[in-house]
Image (spheres, rainbow, N blue to C red):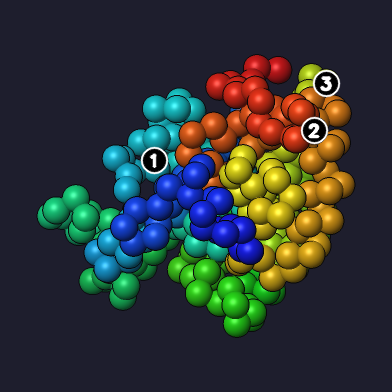
Amino acid sequence: MFGVVPRVVWERVCPPDERNRIRLNMNCVFIDTGSEKVLIETGIGEKWDEKHIEMYGIQRNRPFAESLREIAGCGPEDIDIVVNTHLHFDHAGGNTIGTPFGGTPASRWRVETEPLAGGTPAFHPQFPNARYLVSRSEFKHAQNPHERDRASYLPENWEPVQKSGQLELMPDDYEPIPGLKLQTIRGHSETMQTWRLDRGGKVMYGFADLIPTRHHISLPWIMGYDLYPAETLEFKKRVIPQAVRDGWYCLFYHDFEDPLCQLAEIDGRIVAATTVDAINV
Protein backbone atom coordinates (compact mmCIF):
# COMPACT_ATOMS: atom_id res chain seq x y z
CA MET A 1 0.00 0.00 0.00
CA PHE A 2 2.95 2.38 0.46
CA GLY A 3 5.36 1.51 -2.34
CA VAL A 4 8.86 2.82 -1.67
CA VAL A 5 7.98 4.37 1.71
CA PRO A 6 9.87 2.44 4.43
CA ARG A 7 7.85 0.46 6.93
CA VAL A 8 9.45 2.34 9.82
CA VAL A 9 7.70 5.43 8.45
CA TRP A 10 4.28 4.15 7.38
CA GLU A 11 3.69 1.92 10.42
CA ARG A 12 3.47 5.04 12.58
CA VAL A 13 0.15 5.96 10.99
CA CYS A 14 -1.02 2.53 9.79
CA PRO A 15 0.20 -0.05 12.32
CA PRO A 16 0.12 -3.57 10.81
CA ASP A 17 -1.04 -6.74 12.50
CA GLU A 18 1.14 -9.81 13.01
CA ARG A 19 0.59 -10.79 9.36
CA ASN A 20 1.64 -7.39 8.03
CA ARG A 21 -1.94 -6.39 7.18
CA ILE A 22 -3.29 -2.90 7.76
CA ARG A 23 -6.87 -1.86 8.29
CA LEU A 24 -8.68 -0.48 5.23
CA ASN A 25 -12.28 0.29 4.39
CA MET A 26 -14.36 0.52 1.22
CA ASN A 27 -16.26 3.82 1.34
CA CYS A 28 -18.96 3.74 -1.33
CA VAL A 29 -20.91 6.90 -2.15
CA PHE A 30 -24.69 7.27 -2.41
CA ILE A 31 -26.20 10.23 -4.29
CA ASP A 32 -29.91 11.03 -4.35
CA THR A 33 -30.79 13.63 -7.00
CA GLY A 34 -34.48 13.55 -6.19
CA SER A 35 -35.20 11.66 -9.38
CA GLU A 36 -32.37 9.13 -9.45
CA LYS A 37 -30.45 7.20 -6.82
CA VAL A 38 -26.80 6.66 -7.71
CA LEU A 39 -24.19 4.40 -6.11
CA ILE A 40 -20.49 4.96 -6.79
CA GLU A 41 -18.60 1.67 -6.19
CA THR A 42 -20.04 -1.40 -4.48
CA GLY A 43 -17.24 -2.53 -2.17
CA ILE A 44 -15.59 -5.91 -1.80
CA GLY A 45 -18.79 -7.94 -2.00
CA GLU A 46 -19.94 -11.02 -0.14
CA LYS A 47 -18.91 -13.83 -2.47
CA TRP A 48 -15.83 -14.95 -0.52
CA ASP A 49 -14.97 -18.40 0.81
CA GLU A 50 -13.40 -18.99 4.23
CA LYS A 51 -9.88 -19.13 2.80
CA HIS A 52 -10.02 -15.64 1.33
CA ILE A 53 -11.99 -14.16 4.23
CA GLU A 54 -9.17 -15.31 6.51
CA MET A 55 -6.40 -14.30 4.10
CA TYR A 56 -7.65 -10.76 3.55
CA GLY A 57 -9.06 -10.42 7.06
CA ILE A 58 -12.49 -9.44 5.71
CA GLN A 59 -14.76 -8.26 8.49
CA ARG A 60 -18.35 -7.17 8.00
CA ASN A 61 -21.12 -6.95 10.54
CA ARG A 62 -23.98 -6.97 8.04
CA PRO A 63 -24.65 -7.44 4.32
CA PHE A 64 -24.25 -4.49 1.99
CA ALA A 65 -28.01 -4.34 1.43
CA GLU A 66 -28.59 -3.78 5.16
CA SER A 67 -25.98 -1.02 5.26
CA LEU A 68 -27.65 0.65 2.29
CA ARG A 69 -31.05 0.55 3.98
CA GLU A 70 -29.74 1.83 7.31
CA ILE A 71 -27.48 4.58 5.94
CA ALA A 72 -29.25 5.68 2.74
CA GLY A 73 -32.81 4.66 3.52
CA CYS A 74 -33.31 2.55 0.40
CA GLY A 75 -32.76 -0.98 -0.79
CA PRO A 76 -30.79 -2.46 -3.71
CA GLU A 77 -33.97 -2.49 -5.79
CA ASP A 78 -34.19 1.31 -5.49
CA ILE A 79 -30.78 2.06 -7.02
CA ASP A 80 -31.04 3.51 -10.54
CA ILE A 81 -27.35 3.82 -11.48
CA VAL A 82 -24.23 1.97 -10.31
CA VAL A 83 -20.91 3.57 -11.27
CA ASN A 84 -17.63 1.64 -11.12
CA THR A 85 -14.43 3.69 -11.37
CA HIS A 86 -12.75 0.40 -12.27
CA LEU A 87 -13.50 -3.30 -11.90
CA HIS A 88 -11.01 -4.41 -9.25
CA PHE A 89 -12.72 -6.73 -6.78
CA ASP A 90 -12.59 -4.23 -3.92
CA HIS A 91 -14.52 -1.66 -5.98
CA ALA A 92 -16.92 -3.87 -7.93
CA GLY A 93 -17.30 -6.93 -5.69
CA GLY A 94 -20.77 -5.87 -4.58
CA ASN A 95 -22.04 -5.57 -8.14
CA THR A 96 -23.30 -9.12 -7.85
CA ILE A 97 -24.42 -11.46 -5.11
CA GLY A 98 -24.73 -15.21 -4.79
CA THR A 99 -26.65 -17.84 -2.90
CA PRO A 100 -25.29 -17.91 0.66
CA PHE A 101 -24.75 -20.93 2.82
CA GLY A 102 -25.93 -20.97 6.41
CA GLY A 103 -23.61 -21.82 9.26
CA THR A 104 -20.85 -19.91 10.97
CA PRO A 105 -20.42 -16.16 10.43
CA ALA A 106 -17.31 -16.82 8.32
CA SER A 107 -19.15 -19.15 5.98
CA ARG A 108 -22.27 -17.01 5.59
CA TRP A 109 -20.60 -15.20 2.70
CA ARG A 110 -19.51 -18.29 0.78
CA VAL A 111 -21.54 -18.94 -2.34
CA GLU A 112 -22.15 -21.66 -4.87
CA THR A 113 -19.87 -21.35 -7.90
CA GLU A 114 -22.00 -23.51 -10.21
CA PRO A 115 -25.61 -22.95 -11.35
CA LEU A 116 -28.13 -24.16 -8.81
CA ALA A 117 -30.79 -26.78 -9.42
CA GLY A 118 -33.23 -25.60 -12.08
CA GLY A 119 -30.59 -23.53 -13.85
CA THR A 120 -30.68 -20.54 -11.49
CA PRO A 121 -27.37 -18.67 -11.81
CA ALA A 122 -25.13 -18.75 -8.77
CA PHE A 123 -24.35 -15.04 -9.21
CA HIS A 124 -26.76 -12.29 -10.20
CA PRO A 125 -26.84 -8.48 -10.11
CA GLN A 126 -27.35 -7.10 -6.61
CA PHE A 127 -29.18 -4.03 -7.98
CA PRO A 128 -31.88 -5.51 -10.22
CA ASN A 129 -33.21 -2.23 -11.60
CA ALA A 130 -29.94 -0.35 -12.04
CA ARG A 131 -27.89 0.62 -15.05
CA TYR A 132 -24.28 -0.41 -14.36
CA LEU A 133 -21.82 2.07 -15.88
CA VAL A 134 -18.15 1.39 -16.55
CA SER A 135 -15.84 2.80 -19.19
CA ARG A 136 -15.41 0.77 -22.33
CA SER A 137 -11.62 1.03 -21.91
CA GLU A 138 -11.74 -0.37 -18.37
CA PHE A 139 -14.02 -3.22 -19.41
CA LYS A 140 -11.65 -4.11 -22.24
CA HIS A 141 -8.73 -4.08 -19.78
CA ALA A 142 -10.66 -6.22 -17.27
CA GLN A 143 -11.15 -8.87 -19.94
CA ASN A 144 -7.44 -8.83 -20.83
CA PRO A 145 -5.68 -7.58 -17.69
CA HIS A 146 -2.02 -6.81 -17.13
CA GLU A 147 0.01 -9.53 -15.43
CA ARG A 148 0.43 -7.27 -12.39
CA ASP A 149 -3.28 -6.66 -11.80
CA ARG A 150 -4.79 -9.86 -13.19
CA ALA A 151 -5.65 -11.17 -9.71
CA SER A 152 -7.78 -8.09 -9.02
CA TYR A 153 -10.23 -8.80 -11.84
CA LEU A 154 -12.91 -11.39 -11.07
CA PRO A 155 -15.38 -12.00 -13.93
CA GLU A 156 -18.20 -12.92 -11.54
CA ASN A 157 -18.34 -9.21 -10.63
CA TRP A 158 -19.44 -8.13 -14.11
CA GLU A 159 -20.40 -11.12 -16.28
CA PRO A 160 -23.83 -11.58 -14.62
CA VAL A 161 -24.48 -7.86 -15.15
CA GLN A 162 -23.51 -8.15 -18.80
CA LYS A 163 -25.75 -11.19 -19.25
CA SER A 164 -28.70 -9.41 -17.65
CA GLY A 165 -28.36 -6.52 -20.11
CA GLN A 166 -27.70 -3.98 -17.36
CA LEU A 167 -24.06 -3.23 -18.22
CA GLU A 168 -23.47 -0.04 -20.20
CA LEU A 169 -20.03 0.74 -21.58
CA MET A 170 -19.18 4.43 -21.41
CA PRO A 171 -16.57 6.80 -22.89
CA ASP A 172 -13.31 7.49 -21.06
CA ASP A 173 -14.84 10.72 -19.72
CA TYR A 174 -18.59 11.02 -19.19
CA GLU A 175 -21.34 12.54 -17.03
CA PRO A 176 -23.88 9.97 -15.76
CA ILE A 177 -26.04 12.65 -14.10
CA PRO A 178 -25.75 16.44 -14.30
CA GLY A 179 -22.82 17.60 -12.18
CA LEU A 180 -21.20 14.17 -11.72
CA LYS A 181 -18.19 13.75 -14.00
CA LEU A 182 -16.06 10.65 -14.47
CA GLN A 183 -12.55 11.09 -15.87
CA THR A 184 -10.02 8.44 -16.84
CA ILE A 185 -6.67 9.15 -15.17
CA ARG A 186 -3.64 6.99 -15.95
CA GLY A 187 -1.65 6.04 -12.84
CA HIS A 188 -3.11 3.24 -10.74
CA SER A 189 -3.88 1.63 -14.09
CA GLU A 190 -4.33 2.89 -17.60
CA THR A 191 -8.11 2.96 -17.41
CA MET A 192 -9.18 3.76 -13.81
CA GLN A 193 -11.43 6.78 -13.34
CA THR A 194 -11.80 9.44 -10.69
CA TRP A 195 -15.08 11.29 -10.14
CA ARG A 196 -16.10 14.85 -9.35
CA LEU A 197 -19.49 16.01 -8.08
CA ASP A 198 -20.39 19.70 -8.42
CA ARG A 199 -23.42 20.75 -6.40
CA GLY A 200 -24.49 24.07 -4.90
CA GLY A 201 -21.12 25.70 -5.47
CA LYS A 202 -19.32 22.87 -3.67
CA VAL A 203 -17.08 20.14 -5.06
CA MET A 204 -16.73 16.59 -3.80
CA TYR A 205 -13.90 14.61 -5.39
CA GLY A 206 -13.31 10.87 -5.32
CA PHE A 207 -9.69 9.82 -5.91
CA ALA A 208 -10.52 6.10 -6.10
CA ASP A 209 -7.12 4.32 -5.85
CA LEU A 210 -4.89 7.21 -6.95
CA ILE A 211 -4.96 8.51 -3.36
CA PRO A 212 -6.53 5.62 -1.43
CA THR A 213 -6.26 7.06 2.10
CA ARG A 214 -5.59 10.47 3.62
CA HIS A 215 -2.10 9.23 4.53
CA HIS A 216 -1.34 9.05 0.81
CA ILE A 217 -1.71 12.81 0.35
CA SER A 218 2.05 13.11 0.77
CA LEU A 219 3.56 13.01 -2.72
CA PRO A 220 5.98 10.04 -2.28
CA TRP A 221 3.29 7.83 -0.73
CA ILE A 222 2.20 5.89 -3.82
CA MET A 223 0.98 2.31 -3.82
CA GLY A 224 3.23 -0.42 -5.15
CA TYR A 225 0.12 -1.66 -7.00
CA ASP A 226 0.15 1.33 -9.35
CA LEU A 227 1.12 0.37 -12.89
CA TYR A 228 2.22 3.94 -13.69
CA PRO A 229 3.50 5.46 -10.41
CA ALA A 230 5.25 8.40 -12.10
CA GLU A 231 1.93 9.47 -13.56
CA THR A 232 0.21 9.05 -10.19
CA LEU A 233 2.83 11.46 -8.83
CA GLU A 234 2.15 14.01 -11.58
CA PHE A 235 -1.58 13.78 -10.88
CA LYS A 236 -1.02 14.43 -7.18
CA LYS A 237 1.22 17.42 -7.88
CA ARG A 238 -1.48 18.92 -10.09
CA VAL A 239 -4.70 18.10 -8.27
CA ILE A 240 -3.90 18.24 -4.54
CA PRO A 241 -3.03 21.99 -4.57
CA GLN A 242 -6.28 22.63 -6.45
CA ALA A 243 -8.24 20.69 -3.81
CA VAL A 244 -6.68 22.91 -1.12
CA ARG A 245 -7.18 26.14 -3.03
CA ASP A 246 -10.81 25.49 -3.96
CA GLY A 247 -11.89 23.83 -0.69
CA TRP A 248 -12.89 20.49 -2.16
CA TYR A 249 -14.46 17.75 -0.05
CA CYS A 250 -12.16 14.78 -0.70
CA LEU A 251 -13.31 11.17 -0.50
CA PHE A 252 -10.52 8.68 0.26
CA TYR A 253 -12.04 5.34 -0.69
CA HIS A 254 -9.92 3.08 1.52
CA ASP A 255 -9.56 5.27 4.62
CA PHE A 256 -11.25 3.71 7.66
CA GLU A 257 -11.07 6.65 10.09
CA ASP A 258 -11.77 9.93 8.26
CA PRO A 259 -12.59 9.16 4.62
CA LEU A 260 -14.30 12.48 3.87
CA CYS A 261 -12.03 15.47 4.50
CA GLN A 262 -11.05 18.91 3.39
CA LEU A 263 -7.37 19.63 2.88
CA ALA A 264 -5.22 22.49 4.16
CA GLU A 265 -1.60 23.57 3.99
CA ILE A 266 -0.11 23.71 7.49
CA ASP A 267 3.56 24.56 8.06
CA GLY A 268 4.33 23.89 4.42
CA ARG A 269 2.62 20.46 4.38
CA ILE A 270 -0.74 19.60 2.85
CA VAL A 271 -2.79 17.53 5.27
CA ALA A 272 -6.36 16.36 5.84
CA ALA A 273 -7.36 19.10 8.25
CA THR A 274 -11.16 19.10 8.40
CA THR A 275 -13.21 15.95 8.84
CA VAL A 276 -16.68 16.04 7.30
CA ASP A 277 -19.51 13.76 8.44
CA ALA A 278 -22.09 14.75 5.84
CA ILE A 279 -22.65 17.21 3.01
CA ASN A 280 -26.02 18.80 2.38
CA VAL A 281 -26.44 20.83 -0.81
CA distance separating discs 1 and 3: 32 Å
State the image coordinates of residue 189 (x, y, percent, origin top left): 70, 66
Numbered disc 2: secondary structure:
loop
Residue 232, how many percent across, how many down? 76, 58
What residue is rendered at 29% in x and 40% in y?
61
Q: Amino acid at mark 2?
A: Gly
Residue 252: image quadrant is top right
Look at 66% across and 25% down and name the residue there: 273
Closer to the N terminus: mark 2 or mark 3?
3
Mark 1 or mark 3: whose residue is earlier in sequence: 1
The answer to whether residue 244 is above or below residue 5 is above
Task: Estimate the x, y position of residue 16 in percent, counting from the top left.
Answer: 40, 52
Q: Nearer the viewer, residue 55 or 170?
A: 55
Q: Which residue is mark 2?
A: 268
Location of the C terminus (image quadrant): top right
Viewer-closest of 3 and 113: 3
Left or right of residue 146, residue 115 in this image: left
Q: Estimate the x, y position of residue 38 in percent, counting from the top left.
A: 61, 38
Q: Residues within 10 Å of mark 3 (few under 14, many from 20)?
A: few
Residue pointed to by mark 1: 65
Residue marked by disc 3: 201
Q: Kindly indicate the quadrant of the structure image that contains residue 241.
A: top right
Tag on residue 114? none
Q: Secondary structure at mark 1?
A: helix
